Image (cartoon, rainbow, N blue to C red):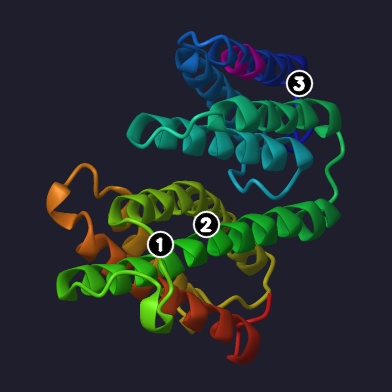
Amino acid sequence: MPETIPNAGQITLMCLSAFLLASSAGLNLLHKKGHWLAAVAVALGLFAIVWHASERGSWMPLEDNFDALAWLGVMLTLCVLYVQATRPVGGLDIFLLPVAGLLLVGAAVFGRIAPHEYSETAWAIFHRLTAYGGALGLAIAGAVGAMYLVANRRLRSKRIGTSAGRAEFGSLERLESVGHFAITLGWPLFTLGLVTGLLWGIHRTSEGRQHEFFGPKIVLAVGVWILYALALHTPINPSFRGKKAAVLSLIGLVLMAGTLVAVQFMPGGQH
């Protein structure tokens, strides 16, 4: 029978990874470079996950608490490292790396509890929190994108100001900064929600339950993810900054609304 309970070596690696994440956050708090510690923590965490999966003969992360919590902690850390490497947000790693560390500690502590009930509760809750939290951030970015387009049009036609009942939206630079900040926070969360949702669907299918992978909500969600991924990386390609990025955010907002409709009303929309 495949081993499902993590051994002492795997639990030790999880605890060490959690310690490294806490140390990384501490160094960043002191304005020192600590991201390399988080990268080492990810490597150790992945090694423990692969080790455990090889022993139990399955890679599916929803089959026991150890893999489920370990995967969530590793994915959250990877998202933080990616955002901080491409579009740094001050304090993001200081707040989120300890959360990822707590998930890894949870993997070590609760790893000996394996019932499938976990996959239908905590995993589902995490999926919904990240999916809806990310959607909220991206929706704010879409709304700011619409404001940017209106303000840009007023600027070109020299109709800026609150006279004649028109609201003041602020400078284009400020709107672009706020919109990009919302995408920087919302896109990683939405990515986690998308990945955990797909893994959950694979798990349900492996248990013989029906799950629609190419339904409207999945297709629309992937479309939203791609659009905001392009908007997130506009600093890398200056030709997409400004108006083009605002248009991408606005289209993403429309697709986001379509995704919510699909989740609520279309067949297969509900989990």
- The percent coordinates of residue 206 (x first, y second) are 63, 63
Relative to 8, residue 129 above or below: below
Name which of mark 2 and mark 3 comes first in the sequence.
Answer: 3
Mark 3 residue type: Asn
Which numbered mark, 1 or 3, is in the foreground of this view? 1
Q: Which residue is mark 2?
A: 190
Residue 257 percent coordinates (x, y)? 50, 80
33 over 204 or under it: above or below: above
Instruction: State the CA–CA distance, disc 1 to disc 3.
Output: 37 Å
Q: Is residue 198 visible to the viewer in this orientation of the structure?
A: no
- Do the residues under discs 1 and 2 have CB atoms within 8 angstroms? yes
Residue wearing tag 3: 7
Q: Residue furthest front?
A: 163
In the drawing, does residue 93 fall left or right of residue 159?
right
User: Residue 81, located in which quarter of the rendered image?
Assistant: top left
Position of the N terminus by quadrant: top right
Q: CA distance from mark 1 to mark 2?
A: 7 Å
Q: How crowded is the residue under tag 3: few (<14 C-alpha within 10 Å), some, or many (20+)?
A: some
- Kind of residue at disc 1: Trp
Q: What stretch of residues is rendered in magenta?
A: 20-25
Amino acid found under the numbered disc labelled 2: Phe
Classify mark 2: residues with Cα within 10 Å, few (<14), some (14-19) or many (20+).
Answer: many
| Disc 2 element | helix
Disc assigned to residue 225: 1
Q: Is residue 22 magenta?
A: yes
Q: Position of residue 261 (x, y in %)?
A: 56, 86
Q: Does dot 1 land on a helix, a strand or a loop?
A: helix
